[in-house]
Every structure is written in structure tokens, then in C-alpha cells.
Image (cartoon, rainbow, N blue to C red):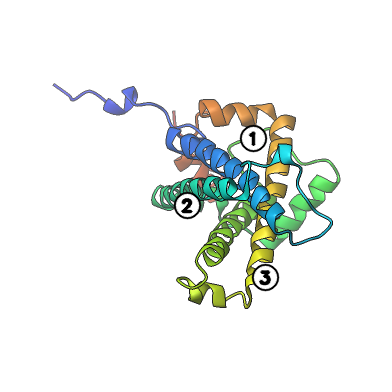
Amino acid sequence: MSKPDVTAHSLPPRLHPLPLRIMHWINALAIFIMIGSGWKIYNDDVIFGFLHFPDWLVIGKWAQYGLQWHFFGMWIFVLNGLAYISYGIATGRFRRKLFPISVREVFATIGEALRFHLRHDDLTHYNAVQKVLYLGIMLVGILIVISGLALWKPIQFSELAGLFGSFQTIRLVHFLCMSAILAFILVHVTLALLVPQSLVAMVTGGPIVDEGQRQAAPAAPEIEATP
């Protein structure tokens, strides 16, 4: 008697697996807390005299409360970020989704976007610009954690603080990283509103995908799968 095919009863792989979706929304909450509380801390000692965030936008009634919220969000962001990077490397998702990247493809994608010919109907494929943006924002996330640690404990993390030269430079780098993350969020949310199925996919998991076939397809497009 042959053994039953257990794979037939397993859940089919989706574009966004459940662990990824959980980490995505945890990260969204952590960033919301960190940006709102960070603006409260910034208001207490501004970098740019012309910039002051209104009270209805910040988190924390006083700067000390803002610091407490900021540390709370920081630990969520760091732990969740470590889990996300570990998951992306261990499962091969980063390798499949974000590589390879060619300069030629980047410029071609930018040209399509400028001509309003960039297609969004295939959620399973990241274009070159998306790959660059996702990799870039991960690097920004690492930099904002490093600069944040240097701001928090400049003596204990003197080696990290020394990379920036001065305390004021650390503050500026931290602020610019926050600005880059905020710009990414605005673009990310705008595209989600323009392509609602991408937002739905991050809640439901999205379409069923066969990563093995997608990975092999570019190498041998002329070979068709047998029924």
C-alpha cells in the first residue's frame, strides 16, 4: 500500500507567508511609535530652527515620555528587524526577490516609470527600482539603529560614536535616516493605494506562487512544465 501524498494536503505557498506578514505589521507599529516619539524628542532640542513638529503629531506629553516611548519602539524595531533579516536569509527570500540587480535594468525601469508605462499587475515580481529601494531602506534601518545607539550611549558605544565624528553629526544622520524612512513610507503607502491588491496581499497572503518555477523560468524559458 503506497503512502499518502502529504504534500497534497499542505497549504500552498503564497506571495507573503504568515511570518512575513506578522513582521511587516509589527514593524509598521514600531516605526509609527519611533517617529512620533522621535519628533517629541526633537522638539526639545531642534536641529533646524525652522522645523518644529506640532503637538498633535508627536507621541509623549513631555520629552521624558517621548524618550520612554522611543525606547519601547526601538526594542520592537530591533528585535523584529533581526527576525526579518534572519527569515529573509534563511528562507532564501532575499536572494529570490531582491537579486540579481543590474544597472541597465534600473535605468530601464526608471524610464518606464517616467513614461507612465510601469506595470503593477504582477505582485510576485519586484522590478529593479523596487529591489534597490527595499535593499536601501534595510541599510537605512541598520544605520538608524547604529546612530541611535551612539546617541543613547555615546560613552558605552564610543566606537560607534567615533564613526560619525561629533554628537551633532550623529543627530543629523539619525534625523536624515528618519526622513528617508518617512519618504519610503509615503511612497509605499501611495503605491498601496494605487494598487489595492498589494495591500490586500499583505493581509491575506496574496496569490499562490511557485518559487521554484519562478526562479528557474528565466534560465530556461523555452522549457514548459509537463502536466
> Residue 144: image x %, image y %?
58, 59
Q: CA distance from mark 3 to mark 1?
A: 44 Å
The residue that appears at 61% across and 74% down in the rendered structure is 164
Residue 141 appearing in the image: yes
> Residue 142: image x %, image y %?
54, 59
> Residue 153: image x %, image y %?
50, 66
Q: Earlier in the sequence, mark 1 or mark 2?
A: 2
Q: Residue 4 vs residue 173: left or right?
A: left
Q: CA distance from mark 1 to mark 2?
A: 31 Å
Front-most of residues 44 and 148: 44
**Can you tell which mark lies on residue 78?**
2
**Can you tell which mark lies on residue 194?**
none
The three-letter amino acid code for the residue at tag 2 is: Val
Task: In the rendered view, tell whether residue 114 sits above or below residue 3.
Answer: below
Label 3 or label 2, whichever lies nearer to me, is 3
Query: Regarding mark 1 in the picture, which secondary structure is present there?
Result: loop
The three-letter amino acid code for the residue at tag 1 is: Asp
Which residue, given by chain and number where applicable, does mark 1 sit on?
A: 122
Task: In the rendered view, tell whether residue 166 sits above or below residue 141.
Answer: below
Query: Regarding mark 3 in the picture, which secondary structure is present there?
Result: helix
Residue 128 appearing in the image: no
Q: CA distance from mark 3 to mark 2?
A: 23 Å
Which residue, given by chain and number where applicable, does mark 3 sit on?
A: 168
The residue that appears at 67% across and 70% down in the rendered structure is 168
Label 2: how many residues lie within 10 Å, few (<14), some (14-19) or many (20+)?
some
Query: Regarding mark 2 in the picture, which secondary structure is present there?
Result: helix
The three-letter amino acid code for the residue at tag 3 is: Gln
